[in-house]
Amino acid sequence: MTTQPRPRRRVAIAGLGAIGKAIARELDRGGVDGMALEAVASADPAKHRGFLQSLQTLPRVRTLDRLWEEADLVIEAAPSRLLREIVEPFVSRGKSAIVMSAAALLDNPDLIDIAKANGGQIIVPTGALIGLDAVTAAAVGTIHSVRMITRKPVDGFRGAPFVIDNGIDLDRVDAPLKLFEGTARQAGKGFPANLNVAVALSLAGIGPDRTMVEIWADPSVTRNTHRIEVDADSARFSMTIENVPSENPKTGMITALSAIALLRKMEAPLQIGT
Ligand SMILES: NC(=O)C1=CN([C@@H]2O[C@H](COP(=O)(O)OP(=O)(O)OC[C@H]3O[C@@H](n4cnc5c(N)ncnc54)[C@H](OP(=O)(O)O)[C@@H]3O)[C@@H](O)[C@H]2O)C=CC1
Ligand SMILES: O=C([O-])CC(=O)C(=O)O
Protein backbone atom coordinates (compact mmCIF):
# COMPACT_ATOMS: atom_id res chain seq x y z
CA MET A 1 0.00 0.00 0.00
CA THR A 2 1.33 3.45 -0.87
CA THR A 3 0.60 6.42 1.36
CA GLN A 4 -0.48 9.66 -0.24
CA PRO A 5 1.62 12.73 0.63
CA ARG A 6 -0.33 15.21 2.73
CA PRO A 7 -1.43 18.35 0.84
CA ARG A 8 0.96 21.25 1.39
CA ARG A 9 -0.16 23.82 3.93
CA ARG A 10 -0.60 27.20 2.19
CA VAL A 11 1.07 30.04 4.06
CA ALA A 12 0.59 33.82 3.89
CA ILE A 13 2.90 36.42 5.43
CA ALA A 14 1.55 39.77 6.61
CA GLY A 15 4.49 42.20 6.74
CA LEU A 16 7.75 42.02 4.81
CA GLY A 17 10.09 43.55 7.37
CA ALA A 18 12.95 41.94 9.29
CA ILE A 19 10.84 38.96 10.33
CA GLY A 20 8.53 38.52 7.31
CA LYS A 21 11.30 38.57 4.71
CA ALA A 22 13.46 36.01 6.55
CA ILE A 23 10.50 33.62 6.81
CA ALA A 24 9.51 34.20 3.17
CA ARG A 25 13.05 33.36 2.01
CA GLU A 26 13.08 30.13 4.02
CA LEU A 27 9.67 28.98 2.82
CA ASP A 28 10.60 29.83 -0.76
CA ARG A 29 13.77 27.75 -0.67
CA GLY A 30 11.78 24.77 0.56
CA GLY A 31 13.14 25.03 4.11
CA VAL A 32 9.84 23.95 5.67
CA ASP A 33 8.65 20.55 4.46
CA GLY A 34 4.92 20.51 3.80
CA MET A 35 4.43 24.29 3.59
CA ALA A 36 4.40 26.66 0.63
CA LEU A 37 4.39 30.46 0.55
CA GLU A 38 1.30 31.54 -1.37
CA ALA A 39 0.74 35.22 -0.60
CA VAL A 40 2.25 38.25 1.09
CA ALA A 41 1.07 41.71 2.16
CA SER A 42 3.04 44.83 2.97
CA ALA A 43 2.31 48.55 3.31
CA ASP A 44 4.17 49.40 0.12
CA PRO A 45 4.54 46.29 -2.08
CA ALA A 46 6.39 48.27 -4.79
CA LYS A 47 9.25 48.73 -2.32
CA HIS A 48 9.64 44.95 -2.16
CA ARG A 49 9.50 44.21 -5.90
CA GLY A 50 13.22 43.35 -6.04
CA PHE A 51 12.96 41.07 -3.02
CA LEU A 52 9.88 39.28 -4.33
CA GLN A 53 11.48 38.81 -7.74
CA SER A 54 14.54 37.26 -6.08
CA LEU A 55 12.32 34.40 -4.84
CA GLN A 56 12.14 31.21 -6.90
CA THR A 57 8.33 31.29 -6.87
CA LEU A 58 6.62 34.65 -6.87
CA PRO A 59 3.90 34.75 -4.17
CA ARG A 60 0.68 36.65 -4.81
CA VAL A 61 0.63 40.16 -3.35
CA ARG A 62 -2.64 40.86 -1.55
CA THR A 63 -4.10 43.39 0.85
CA LEU A 64 -4.50 42.22 4.45
CA ASP A 65 -8.25 41.64 4.11
CA ARG A 66 -7.74 39.21 1.16
CA LEU A 67 -4.87 37.09 2.48
CA TRP A 68 -7.25 34.49 3.94
CA GLU A 69 -8.45 33.61 0.43
CA GLU A 70 -4.98 32.34 -0.44
CA ALA A 71 -3.81 30.50 2.68
CA ASP A 72 -4.59 28.16 5.57
CA LEU A 73 -2.11 29.85 7.89
CA VAL A 74 -1.01 33.47 8.24
CA ILE A 75 2.19 34.71 9.85
CA GLU A 76 1.53 38.11 11.42
CA ALA A 77 4.78 40.11 11.18
CA ALA A 78 3.47 43.66 10.91
CA PRO A 79 3.00 46.65 13.26
CA SER A 80 0.98 45.64 16.30
CA ARG A 81 -1.96 47.95 15.49
CA LEU A 82 -2.81 45.62 12.55
CA LEU A 83 -3.13 42.46 14.64
CA ARG A 84 -6.93 42.18 14.48
CA GLU A 85 -7.10 43.01 10.78
CA ILE A 86 -4.63 40.18 10.05
CA VAL A 87 -5.69 37.50 12.51
CA GLU A 88 -9.50 37.70 12.63
CA PRO A 89 -10.21 36.72 8.97
CA PHE A 90 -8.17 33.55 9.50
CA VAL A 91 -9.27 32.35 12.92
CA SER A 92 -12.95 33.17 12.27
CA ARG A 93 -12.75 30.72 9.35
CA GLY A 94 -11.11 27.92 11.34
CA LYS A 95 -7.63 28.74 10.05
CA SER A 96 -4.42 29.42 11.99
CA ALA A 97 -2.43 32.56 12.78
CA ILE A 98 1.14 32.76 14.05
CA VAL A 99 1.37 36.01 16.00
CA MET A 100 4.66 37.90 16.39
CA SER A 101 3.08 41.10 17.82
CA ALA A 102 2.17 39.24 20.99
CA ALA A 103 1.72 42.42 23.05
CA ALA A 104 -1.30 43.37 20.91
CA LEU A 105 -3.12 40.19 21.98
CA LEU A 106 -3.74 41.84 25.35
CA ASP A 107 -5.85 44.52 23.63
CA ASN A 108 -7.66 41.93 21.52
CA PRO A 109 -8.37 39.03 23.88
CA ASP A 110 -11.62 38.18 22.09
CA LEU A 111 -9.58 36.92 19.12
CA ILE A 112 -8.89 33.86 21.26
CA ASP A 113 -12.65 33.36 21.80
CA ILE A 114 -13.26 33.77 18.07
CA ALA A 115 -10.59 31.15 17.33
CA LYS A 116 -12.11 28.78 19.90
CA ALA A 117 -15.66 29.20 18.58
CA ASN A 118 -14.61 28.53 14.98
CA GLY A 119 -11.90 25.90 15.33
CA GLY A 120 -9.11 28.36 14.55
CA GLN A 121 -5.78 28.61 16.31
CA ILE A 122 -3.49 31.43 17.45
CA ILE A 123 0.13 30.44 18.01
CA VAL A 124 2.74 32.69 19.66
CA PRO A 125 6.30 31.49 19.04
CA THR A 126 9.01 31.86 21.66
CA GLY A 127 10.32 34.60 19.37
CA ALA A 128 13.15 36.68 20.77
CA LEU A 129 12.91 35.01 24.18
CA ILE A 130 14.16 31.84 25.82
CA GLY A 131 12.68 29.20 28.05
CA LEU A 132 8.98 29.24 27.26
CA ASP A 133 9.15 25.44 27.18
CA ALA A 134 10.14 25.38 30.85
CA VAL A 135 7.66 28.14 31.76
CA THR A 136 4.70 26.33 30.18
CA ALA A 137 5.76 23.11 31.91
CA ALA A 138 6.10 24.85 35.28
CA ALA A 139 2.66 26.44 34.76
CA VAL A 140 1.08 22.97 34.80
CA GLY A 141 2.09 23.04 38.46
CA THR A 142 2.26 26.24 40.49
CA ILE A 143 4.48 29.19 39.56
CA HIS A 144 5.11 31.56 42.47
CA SER A 145 6.77 34.40 40.55
CA VAL A 146 8.11 35.40 37.14
CA ARG A 147 10.42 38.34 36.60
CA MET A 148 12.04 39.58 33.40
CA ILE A 149 14.84 42.12 33.02
CA THR A 150 15.40 43.58 29.56
CA ARG A 151 18.45 45.61 28.50
CA LYS A 152 18.70 47.08 25.05
CA PRO A 153 20.89 49.61 23.29
CA VAL A 154 19.39 53.07 23.65
CA ASP A 155 18.31 53.26 19.98
CA GLY A 156 16.05 50.24 20.47
CA PHE A 157 13.64 52.41 22.47
CA ARG A 158 13.15 55.26 20.01
CA GLY A 159 9.46 55.88 19.36
CA ALA A 160 8.23 53.82 22.35
CA PRO A 161 5.01 55.39 23.74
CA PHE A 162 6.34 55.21 27.32
CA VAL A 163 9.49 57.14 26.34
CA ILE A 164 7.51 59.78 24.46
CA ASP A 165 4.78 60.18 27.11
CA ASN A 166 7.38 60.61 29.87
CA GLY A 167 9.55 63.05 27.88
CA ILE A 168 12.64 60.81 28.21
CA ASP A 169 15.52 62.23 26.16
CA LEU A 170 17.33 59.12 24.91
CA ASP A 171 20.14 61.25 23.44
CA ARG A 172 21.20 62.11 26.98
CA VAL A 173 21.43 58.51 28.23
CA ASP A 174 25.16 57.84 28.77
CA ALA A 175 24.89 55.22 31.55
CA PRO A 176 22.43 52.33 32.13
CA LEU A 177 19.02 53.87 32.88
CA LYS A 178 16.05 51.97 34.29
CA LEU A 179 13.21 53.21 32.08
CA PHE A 180 10.41 51.14 33.55
CA GLU A 181 9.39 48.70 36.26
CA GLY A 182 5.92 47.19 36.35
CA THR A 183 3.73 44.43 35.00
CA ALA A 184 3.98 42.77 31.58
CA ARG A 185 0.62 44.31 30.68
CA GLN A 186 1.95 47.81 31.39
CA ALA A 187 5.21 47.01 29.57
CA GLY A 188 3.32 45.82 26.49
CA LYS A 189 1.38 49.09 26.34
CA GLY A 190 4.37 51.34 26.95
CA PHE A 191 6.75 49.45 24.64
CA PRO A 192 4.59 47.63 22.05
CA ALA A 193 7.48 47.15 19.60
CA ASN A 194 9.97 46.14 22.30
CA LEU A 195 8.28 43.97 24.86
CA ASN A 196 6.36 41.34 22.92
CA VAL A 197 8.60 38.90 24.71
CA ALA A 198 7.33 39.98 28.14
CA VAL A 199 3.75 39.42 27.04
CA ALA A 200 4.57 36.02 25.51
CA LEU A 201 6.29 35.08 28.78
CA SER A 202 3.25 36.18 30.77
CA LEU A 203 0.84 34.21 28.57
CA ALA A 204 3.00 31.10 28.99
CA GLY A 205 3.17 31.52 32.76
CA ILE A 206 1.15 33.47 35.33
CA GLY A 207 -0.47 36.14 33.18
CA PRO A 208 0.21 39.78 32.31
CA ASP A 209 -0.73 41.22 35.70
CA ARG A 210 1.57 39.00 37.81
CA THR A 211 4.60 38.88 35.50
CA MET A 212 6.98 41.65 36.57
CA VAL A 213 9.26 43.47 34.14
CA GLU A 214 12.24 45.82 34.35
CA ILE A 215 13.43 47.67 31.25
CA TRP A 216 16.84 49.28 30.93
CA ALA A 217 18.24 51.52 28.20
CA ASP A 218 21.89 50.56 28.34
CA PRO A 219 24.54 52.24 26.18
CA SER A 220 27.03 49.52 27.16
CA VAL A 221 25.14 46.66 25.43
CA THR A 222 25.06 45.94 21.72
CA ARG A 223 22.53 43.13 21.95
CA ASN A 224 18.88 42.99 23.03
CA THR A 225 19.26 41.11 26.31
CA HIS A 226 16.43 39.43 28.20
CA ARG A 227 16.83 37.60 31.51
CA ILE A 228 13.95 35.63 33.01
CA GLU A 229 13.75 34.43 36.62
CA VAL A 230 11.09 31.90 37.54
CA ASP A 231 10.24 30.41 40.91
CA ALA A 232 7.82 27.49 40.82
CA ASP A 233 6.92 24.50 42.98
CA SER A 234 8.59 22.20 40.43
CA ALA A 235 11.76 24.18 39.72
CA ARG A 236 13.59 27.45 40.06
CA PHE A 237 15.33 28.71 36.94
CA SER A 238 16.87 31.80 35.38
CA MET A 239 18.01 32.22 31.80
CA THR A 240 19.47 34.99 29.69
CA ILE A 241 19.42 35.52 25.95
CA GLU A 242 21.54 38.13 24.15
CA ASN A 243 20.00 38.78 20.76
CA VAL A 244 21.95 40.04 17.77
CA PRO A 245 19.78 42.81 16.29
CA SER A 246 18.44 42.24 12.78
CA GLU A 247 18.09 44.89 10.07
CA ASN A 248 15.43 46.33 12.42
CA PRO A 249 17.38 47.30 15.60
CA LYS A 250 14.28 46.62 17.74
CA THR A 251 14.06 43.02 16.52
CA GLY A 252 16.52 40.23 17.30
CA MET A 253 17.65 37.98 14.43
CA ILE A 254 16.55 34.92 16.34
CA THR A 255 12.89 36.00 16.22
CA ALA A 256 12.39 34.95 12.60
CA LEU A 257 14.38 31.77 13.22
CA SER A 258 12.04 30.92 16.09
CA ALA A 259 9.02 31.24 13.79
CA ILE A 260 10.73 29.10 11.13
CA ALA A 261 11.55 26.44 13.75
CA LEU A 262 7.90 26.50 14.83
CA LEU A 263 6.70 26.02 11.22
CA ARG A 264 9.06 23.05 10.84
CA LYS A 265 7.83 21.57 14.10
CA MET A 266 4.19 21.91 13.04
CA GLU A 267 4.87 19.54 10.12
CA ALA A 268 7.51 17.29 11.68
CA PRO A 269 7.11 13.55 12.34
CA LEU A 270 9.38 14.00 15.39
CA GLN A 271 8.68 17.01 17.59
CA ILE A 272 11.14 18.02 20.31
CA GLY A 273 10.30 20.29 23.24
CA THR A 274 7.03 21.12 24.97
N1 LIG B 1 7.43 38.03 19.52
C1 LIG B 1 8.69 38.46 19.46
O1 LIG B 1 9.59 37.87 20.07
C2 LIG B 1 9.02 39.65 18.64
C3 LIG B 1 8.03 40.33 17.98
N2 LIG B 1 8.31 41.41 17.20
C4 LIG B 1 7.18 42.11 16.56
O2 LIG B 1 6.94 41.54 15.27
C5 LIG B 1 6.36 42.54 14.41
C6 LIG B 1 7.16 42.62 13.11
O3 LIG B 1 8.51 42.97 13.42
P1 LIG B 1 9.59 43.38 12.28
O4 LIG B 1 9.55 42.41 11.16
O5 LIG B 1 10.87 43.63 12.97
O6 LIG B 1 8.96 44.77 11.79
P2 LIG B 1 9.41 45.70 10.58
O7 LIG B 1 9.14 47.10 11.01
O8 LIG B 1 10.77 45.33 10.10
O9 LIG B 1 8.35 45.31 9.43
C7 LIG B 1 6.99 45.60 9.53
C8 LIG B 1 6.32 45.25 8.21
O10 LIG B 1 4.91 45.53 8.32
C9 LIG B 1 4.48 46.03 7.08
N3 LIG B 1 3.25 46.82 7.17
C10 LIG B 1 3.05 48.04 7.72
N4 LIG B 1 1.78 48.43 7.48
C11 LIG B 1 1.19 47.44 6.76
C12 LIG B 1 -0.10 47.26 6.20
N5 LIG B 1 -1.06 48.19 6.32
N6 LIG B 1 -0.37 46.12 5.51
C13 LIG B 1 0.57 45.17 5.37
N7 LIG B 1 1.83 45.28 5.87
C14 LIG B 1 2.12 46.41 6.57
C15 LIG B 1 5.64 46.91 6.61
O11 LIG B 1 5.50 47.07 5.20
P3 LIG B 1 6.57 47.91 4.28
O12 LIG B 1 7.87 47.16 4.38
O13 LIG B 1 5.97 47.81 2.91
O14 LIG B 1 6.62 49.29 4.86
C16 LIG B 1 6.84 46.07 7.02
O15 LIG B 1 7.19 45.20 5.98
C17 LIG B 1 6.38 43.85 15.21
O16 LIG B 1 5.12 44.09 15.82
C18 LIG B 1 7.43 43.58 16.30
O17 LIG B 1 7.20 44.36 17.45
C19 LIG B 1 9.61 41.80 17.01
C20 LIG B 1 10.64 41.15 17.66
C21 LIG B 1 10.42 40.07 18.58
O1 LIG C 1 14.50 41.40 21.78
C1 LIG C 1 14.00 41.55 20.67
O2 LIG C 1 14.58 41.24 19.65
C2 LIG C 1 12.63 42.11 20.47
C3 LIG C 1 11.85 42.23 21.65
O3 LIG C 1 12.32 42.38 22.73
C4 LIG C 1 10.40 42.16 21.51
O4 LIG C 1 9.83 42.59 20.48
O5 LIG C 1 9.78 41.64 22.42
Image (tube, rainbow, N blue to C red):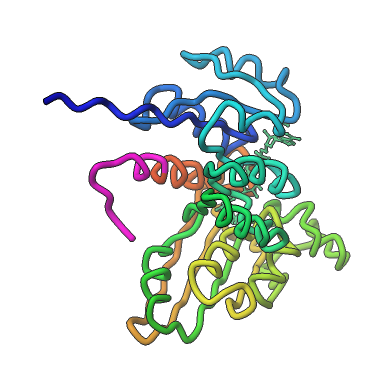
Residue 31 sits in quarter = top left
**How many circles with numbers are drawn on the protein?**
0
Residue 89 visible to the viewer: yes
- The reply, left or right, for residue 117 in relation to residue 42 is left
- Farthest left residue? 1
The front one of 87 and 17 is 87
Q: Quadrant of residue 150?
A: bottom right
Q: Residue shown at 15%/24% (left/top)?
A: 2
Which residue corresponds to the image point at 41% horizontal and 46% vertical from the top-left?
Answer: 262
Is residue 219 among the parts visible in the rendering? no
Q: Is residue 171 above or below residue 198?
A: above
Q: Nearer the viewer, residue 119 or 268?
A: 119
- Return the residue nearer the eye: 239 or 188: 188
Q: Residue at x 68, y 77 (%)?
A: 182
At 34% across and 81% down in the image, what residue appears?
235
In the rendered image, residue 146, in percent from the top left (x then y), is placed at 51, 78
Quarter the C terminus occupies: bottom left
Look at the image and give the residue range highlighted in magenta: 263-274
Quarter of the rendering occupied by the N terminus: top left
The percent coordinates of residue 168 (x first, y second) are 83, 64
- Measured as percent of width and height from the top left, residue 187 is found at 69, 68
Asked if the magenta segment contains residue 85, the reply would be no
| Nearer-the-camera pick, 166 or 115 | 115
Q: Is residue 272 magenta?
A: yes
Q: Position of residue 144 (x, y in %)?
A: 47, 86
